[in-house]
Image: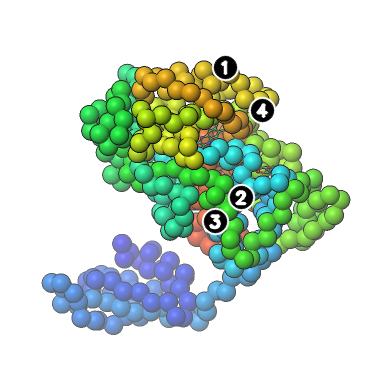
Amino acid sequence: MWSKEICKQIHLSSHKDSTFSTYTSARLIKKNLDRNGLIYELAEGFSKKRHMLKGKAQTANTKKIFEKKKIAVIGAGITGCTLAYKLAQRGHTVDLYDQNEEVCTGASGNSVLITYPRLSAFDSPYARFCIHSFLFASSFYDRLKTNAWQKSGVFLMNHDNSSLKRQNSLLNANPENLFKELSREEASKRAGLELNNGGIFFDKGGFIEPKSLCLDLLRLKNINLILSSKIKDINTDGDNPKIVIKGKISKYNEVCLCTGHTSEDLLRLPGLSSKRGQISYVDSSKDFENLNFPICASGYFSPMVNGSHVLGSSYSDIKNNIVLEEEHVDNKKKLKAIHDFNVDILDGNVGFRAVTKDRMPLIGIKKGIYINTGHGSRGSTSSPICAEIIADLIDSRTLPVDTEVAIALDVNRFT
Ligand SMILES: Cc1cc2nc3c(=O)[nH]c(=O)nc-3n(C[C@H](O)[C@H](O)[C@H](O)COP(=O)(O)OP(=O)(O)OC[C@H]3O[C@@H](n4cnc5c(N)ncnc54)[C@H](O)[C@@H]3O)c2cc1C
């Protein structure tokens, strides 16, 4: 690791108070440190090592103080609330706008969102993003210490030959020990419900209650939530972007769009489209009231939250937002793969996912505006890492993903 290229980069990235240490004291490493402006001293080693190295950079650079900015975030779904929180945590002042009277009225309006990753048996930017966004989300929600996150684990059941085949190839890869195989018996015992098949279990997965989680995020005092305010236009001429609400113009250092599937109303975003989805709220029953974690197959079934279970979800091109009986029937069919019980549907909720052709979000800068949309069917998994990426772009910091992943997410990739 301590190659001359890395030492050079460490020197470039250091300020005069930066320090380093390493358990190693090999001659080659000392040579590379010496030649790249990193001074060191020998210190007592630990365990069986006699020596270790510790030192600092020879540089006049001083620690960069990040400029505190005034930032507008448009859209108060899970994506916009997560971003507002990240920015506010870094000391920026955030005005978070939504056209509706409450937070989480768009795609984030379901009572429950399941947090688990898509998986691929082969390495690719897509596969790396799926894994990292999932691990990032799980630890982000853990650190919030909110009751709106249940780290219950998530069970992905194999429900037909093709899902069984796929899971077998995933088990051979199993990146980062992300999941474990469970037999039907073991899965049923853990779930507290007799299941139709075995599958794989993500113990870092779980589910969020988006609205109460977002309200927890928005408690930071430098977030100003402005509801019932539809942004009509964003003007990026001149130095600072300006937004127009009810004919009034407000000026910001930065503007971020987290407007889900309607983002194109404000800015043309090639590659973005929308897909309707309906969930069904199922009355709880003795048969499944003790379900311990979400079960996902072709659809999903959640543990009980506020007296009902979420059964999801349809995926259609219908454009209206009316709860449809035919989509409840569709959801019930998906449930049959999990367990053959009858359910009473109480109600439903319709949302529109912002989707892209390659199932990666659209992240980055376009026409001077930060874009954070296209979270498709996995917004609770992808929003936290994408918020971190946007915050790092704004602060000119190193991104939390590798360059190939950043390119694969780039908002301009379909242009
Ligand atoms: C049926 C269904 C089931 C799903 N299940 C899951 C699941 O189990 N797990 C999971 O992770 N994901 C799931 N998803 C996907 C998830 O819901 C989305 O990925 C996520 O909610 C997207 O959040 P968002 O904040 O980007 O968009 P949205 O929640 O749609 O938020 C966009 C916000 O922008 C506001 N807005 C738009 N235009 C303007 C404007 N001009 N001015 C002011 N405000 C504006 C809207 O009012 C809205 O509040 C599901 C989606 C659906 C539809």
What mark, if any, has residue 216 been given in the picture? 3
Disc nearest the viewer among 2 and 4: 4
Q: Quadrant of the N terminus?
A: bottom left
Distance Cα–Cα, label 2 vs label 4: 22 Å
Q: Gap in Å between the C-alphas at discs 2 and 3?
A: 13 Å
Which secondary structure, mark 2?
helix
Of mark 1 and mark 3, the one earlier in the sequence is 3
Identified by mark 3, the residue type is Asp
CA–CA distance between discs 2 and 1?
A: 32 Å
Residue contact at pointers 1 and 4, CB within 8 angstroms: no
Q: Looking at the image, which residue sits at the far front? A: 286
**Mark 3 closeness class: few <14, some 14–19, many ≥20 residues within 10 Å:** some
Q: Quadrant of ligand 1?
A: top right
| Residue at the spot of label 1 | 326
Q: Is residue 192 left or right of residue 219?
A: left
- Which sits earlier in the primary sequence, circle 2 or circle 4? 2
Q: Residue at x 30, y 34 (%)?
A: 192
Q: Does label 4 point to a residue whose CB lies under 8 Å from ligand 1?
A: no
Is residue 126 visible in this depiction of the protein? Answer: no
- Which amino acid type is shown beneath numbered disc 4? Asn
The amino acid pointed to by label 2 is Gly
In the picture, measured across the screen, residue 150 lies left or right of residue 189, that is right
Distance between the Cα atoms at labels 1 and 3? 36 Å
Q: Is residue 262 visible?
A: yes
Q: Is mark 2 within 8 Å of ligand 1?
A: yes
Q: Are marks 1 and 3 in contact (CB under 8 Å)?
A: no
Q: Earlier in the sequence, mark 1 or mark 4?
A: 4
The residue where tag 2 is placed is 80
Specify the quadrant that holds the C terminus. top right
**Residue lying farthest left?**
48
Q: Which residue is mark 4?
A: 321
